[in-house]
Image (cartoon, helix red, strand yellow):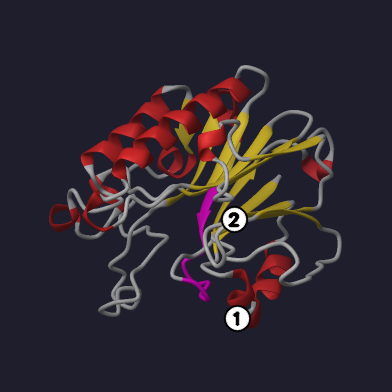
Amino acid sequence: MRLVSWNVNGFRAILQKGFGDFLRSSNADVFCIQETKMQAGQIEVAFDGYEQYWNSAERKGYSGTAVFSRVEPLDVLYDIGREEHTGEGRAITLEFENFYLVTVYAPNSKDGLARLPYRMEWEDGFRGYVKRLDEKKPVVICGDMNVAHREIDLRHPKTNRMNAGFSDEERAKMTELLSAGFVDSFRYLYPDKTDAYTWWSYLRQARKTNAGWRIDYFIVSEALRGDIEESLIYSDVYGSDHCPVGLILGLGKGNQGL
């Protein structure tokens, strides 16, 4: 099964930058996007063979997630089951026969870590949510987690320590999530791979010099560790300040038994 995730930094804008071509060429069974920055009804799109599911923020031009799936889910859930974490369109869960797929756009802690206290509450709520799902069947988590977990996951760790996305607190929450029975698929396959990033600032030609961060993930339940065939970073795909990431799982071949 082939899964793709991309923080598009504005869905309407990326439609003009080849999004449809990449979706089709990716051959994804399920294609997840984050930071749609739009409300339902603002635009109508259709991609042959894909059903679509949207979770938009109440605030216009902000946050939001969506999923395009060639496989019909058994159920679709929105947000993470806690009222204090609704309204920003940050998560969609698709239930398939053998696993849950959760696409997520984690809150940014903002300059000066102004939103860090809320981020910590959200992290605990999200971890509890996926752990409850994992008690029923395995979980695949994908999306912009807004944290570089280890120093290897960004070009300049020393000068960015305690900046948003690389604070000790955010990194510790990622460690807690992984310790709760989940696997970072990319680091599982490539534990020592350097210069592998998924986000680059628009400033100082960061993408040209590959001064990036790896903050977009595919994380899976321990039960799926042995099914990880490939974890991909599409660093040559442009259109956003993030690039897409992908996961190939050795299950559900031919869209059977998902």
Residue 22 is drawn in which quadrant? bottom right
**Magenta: main secondary structure:** loop
- At horizontal 37% and vertical 58% (from top left) the residue drawn is 196
- Relative placement, left or right, of 233 versus 255 is left
Question: Would residue 255 be seen by someone viewing this image from the given angle?
Answer: yes
Q: Are marks 1 and 2 in contact (CB under 8 Å)?
A: no
- At horizontal 74% and vertical 28% (from top left) the residue drawn is 98
The numbered disc on residue 30 is none
Question: Would residue 32 be seen by someone viewing this image from the given angle?
Answer: no
Residue 73 is drawn in which quadrant? top right
Q: Amino acid at mark 2?
A: Glu
- Could you say where residue 60 lies in the image, as x and y percent from the top left? 57, 65
- Relative placement, left or right, of 188 versus 227 is left
Name the image quarter holding the C terminus: top right
Within the magenta stretch, is there residue 236?
yes
- Could you say where residue 247 lies in the image, as x and y percent from the top left? 59, 47
Pick whichever, 145 or 122, lies toward us.
122
Q: Amino acid at mark 1?
A: Lys
Q: Residue furthest bottom?
A: 16
Which residue position is annotated with label 1? 17
- Relative placement, left or right, of 106 versus 139 is left
Q: Which segment did they paint magenta? A: 231-240
Compared to residue 168, the image places residue 128 above or below, namely: above
Name the image quarter holding the N terminus: top right
- Could you say where residue 128 lies in the image, as x and y percent from the top left? 50, 24
Q: Residue furthest left?
A: 158
Pick whichever, 191 or 213, lies toward us.
213
Compared to residue 165, the image places residue 201 above or below, namely: below
Which residue position is annotated with label 2? 58
Residue 257 is drawn in which quadrant? top right
Q: Alpha-carbon neighbours of circle 2 within 10 Å: few (<14), some, or many (≥20)?
A: some
